[in-house]
Image: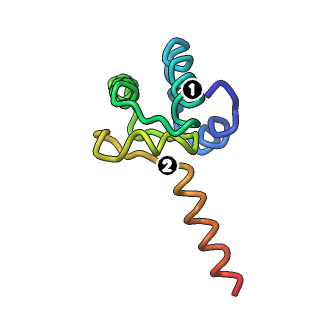
Amino acid sequence: MEQDFYKSRIESNGIKVLVPNEEERKRINQIIYEELCLGKIQPSSRDYYKNVIRNLVEQGAEGIILGCTEIGLLVRQEDSEVPLFDTAKIHAIEAVNKALASQ
């Protein structure tokens, strides 16, 4: 979230990008590396992510990018009032589309 991978591309298209605050980012990363990467799905972590999403929506977010492949294991569209963009799913769909288009 601190890196410019998605942010600069999105902002270059006139879309404002919001990121969780520093404390939220630390906890998000902790959940990813100490739980999700190890196959642990904790209800308390799901609740934490849902709260972070709500905070971003209250700041004006109209969509949420799940920018780490493991996050989709924890939160689903029904956990958010705005669209979730699961980058793992998006990449998989586009890989299949590209493979099928080259035939």
Image position, residue 50 (x, y; %)? 34, 30
Q: Which residue, given by chain and number where applicable, does mark 2 sit on?
A: 86
Q: Which residue, given by chain and number where applicable, does mark 1 sit on?
A: 34
Image position, residue 80 (x, y; %)? 31, 39
In the image, what residue type sits under mark 1?
A: Glu
In the image, what residue type sits under mark 2?
A: Asp
- Residue 101's label in the rendered image is none
Residue 90 against residue 9 in the figure, above or below: below
Q: Which of marks 2 and 1 is in front?
A: 1
Q: Give the quarter of the figure containing the N terminus.
A: top right
Viewer-proximal residue among 82 and 9 = 82
Image position, residue 77 (x, y; %)? 34, 47
Q: What element carries label 2?
A: strand
Residue drawn where x is 47% and y is 48% of the image? 85
Viewer-proximal residue among 41 and 103 = 41
Query: Between marks 2 and 1, how big is the CA–CA gap?
Result: 20 Å
Q: What element carries label 1?
A: helix
On the rendered structure, is 52 left or right of 89? left
Quick check: marks 2 and 1 in contact, CB under 8 Å? no
Residue drawn where x is 56% and y is 52% of the image? 88
Residue drawn where x is 60% and y is 42% of the image? 10
On the rendered structure, is 41 left or right of 2? left
Viewer-proximal residue among 17 and 43 = 43
Of callouts 2 and 1, the N-terminal one: 1
Residue drawn where x is 67% and y is 76% of the image? 99
Q: Give the quarter of the figure containing the C terminus.
A: bottom right
Residue 10 against residue 21 in the figure, above or below: below
